[in-house]
Image (cartoon, grey):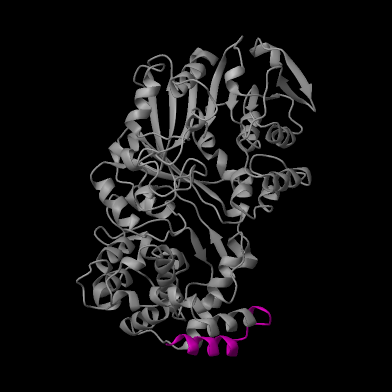
Amino acid sequence: MNENTFFKNNFQLHEDIFVTETAQAFRYSDGGKAESTIAHAIQSSSDLSSDSSELEKHIKSWPTYYHLDSSRANFFRALNLTRGKTILEVGSGCGSISRYLAENSEHVVCVEGSLTRAKVCKSRLKGLDNVTVISCNINELLPKKQFDLVVCNGVLEYSPVYSRSKEAVSDFIKMTADFLDDSGLLILGIENKYGLKYFQGYPEDHTGLPFDGIQGYLSREPSPITFSRGKLEEVLGKRYQHLEFYYPFPDYKHPRLILSNQALLELNPSELIAIFDKHKAVAQNIFCSTSAWKSICDDGLVKFFSNSFYVTARKQARALEIVEDQPLIWWYSKNRKREYQVNAVVRKTFTNSLIVSKALRYGNITTDLNKGFEHVLEDSKWITEESMGSQIRSRLMKQKETRGFIEISEDLILDWWENVRYQEGIGRNLEGVYFDFHWYNYFPNSGEKIDLEWVLRDGVDPLHLVFRSVKCFFQAEKSTAPHWSPKARQATPYTVTKQIASLLQLKFSLLLFYNCFMAERRFLTAVQARPVGRLQFLVLFMSPVQIKILSFCSQLKADLVLSTKRRLTKLTLYKLVRRLQF
């Protein structure tokens, strides 16, 4: 197959890129420096596969993250729709998704308006002979042979900018349908005009202006435009009879959590959304998005406020299919070393049970005895209630609450501790399976435990479990902490761990606390893709208020900078800890 198989146009060959005779300069760019950096990363790497860890080492900025991170293709991995298909990819960019499509299909035609980006895309596809790269405006192409699949990822919103038509959006949708076989499928990824993050004050992804899309894109014309779910259904419905919506988090660009429409009917995904809907903080910080998502999920409104959409569209209506073990939700772990990265699926069985299945993304589970832990993956049932961590968060956010952290959560902590078991025989360690028994893996109402993924061979120091649970809680609730009650905001991981140790009658000292940190650091260094520095120890002594103050505390900042230039000893840490007690 080649360019003339699918199109009537005449093409000229330009450095292995096919260009139409009428092609004009295309202005879209991530910036010349950024695209040069991406091109260099690809040219200097031997592994160009769609999940290349070698390419990910070059990620230093948003453009490199966007074009080189393997999570870009997660939606296509989840649905597995490309096998044996001929595919037209509109707006291929630098080839991140193109590479996955080509690895898993019969033939891919990549169309990219920018000749510079088309060349980068071609270099990313090195070694694959089932790919054709064309540089032109998609509106110039004249279909000759139709495709099984058309992919438009982050493209529809730009149709008013790169088309002269007054009906640019409708014309673009018609064009995608003209390229498709009657039984073919369109896959479209796009931001939601009314995504919750935009109400919180995040800049609009295309114009960079807060609230711009919500207000109807009044800033400039022509402008990229996004759509609500209802409007997207309307414009797609003119050419397609069968639509299925999916809700990716944090967004469609790097989906780590994907919810199907059926999932929203079967279960409440607020706990998962709280984990995966992570964005950089904004100055407005108008409300707590975690609490908002819980309310939105309770009221069945995720489909209206999801930050973005994936849509699959068919030209022909389909009969209702009953699928055994129907997948409802997909999620992908990240920030781990490759041997520990996990894919998870929530399935609905014929008995209407909801089962969570996990599998390693790369290879088989191996036990490294030298590391002192085992990695255990087991199927489990979906739990419908709130975790202990979520219940504590809800209590802390009651603004009229005058009690401190421990007083608010004491009953939950005591109940949680009643569910741990000590090892038999000599010693006072807990059984190794409880290493991952933190507050988000325990459900007090039913007493269920889930996701006990890590097992320590020599058992778990009780204080380490308390330390780990508190640390995980403060890390997970970093975005909600500014919305806690005034007294709760004064708590630090150190003070909470100390108070819980007293409540549970466990030995505690600053040295024991430091030893817990170092033990946790050794574990995370063995598992995570990025090492954990000793300097992170200091954060454990900071309340949410103090973390904000840190940026204004010049003397402390100077001490921190100095400490990174020399070996960070226990003594140095203690000195810095004392300075933090202001």
Query: Toward which corner of the image does residue 85 lie, by quadrant?
Result: top right
572 lies above or below 346: below
Residue at 54% across / 52% down in the picture? 334
**Left or right for 112, reference 154:** right
Residue 358 shows in the view: yes
Q: Is residue 448 above or below residue 487?
A: above
Q: Quadrant for the C terminus, please.
A: bottom left
Q: How many marks?
A: 0
Residue 170 position within the rendered picture, expressed as x and y whole percent measured from the top left: 43, 20
Q: Position of residue 351 (x, y in %)?
A: 30, 34
Q: From the viewer's perspective, is residue 391 above or below residue 275?
A: below
Q: To which quarter of the image does residue 249 belong?
A: top left
Residue closer to the observer: 515 or 273: 273
249 vs 99: above or below: below
Secondary structure of the magenta portion, mostly? Answer: helix
Left or right of 270, for residue 478: right
Q: Is residue 569 magenta?
A: yes
Q: Is residue 490 magenta?
A: no
Query: Residue 29 appears at what percent x and percent y?
Result: 63, 39
User: Residue placed at 41% from the left, 14% from the top?
Assistant: 316
Asked whether, in this view, residue 556 is left or right of residue 195, the answer is: right
Q: Residue furthest left?
A: 400
Specify the segment rendered in magenta.
564-582
* Residue 363 visible here: no
Q: Quadrant of the N terminus?
A: top right
Residue 440 on image: x %, y %: 37, 61
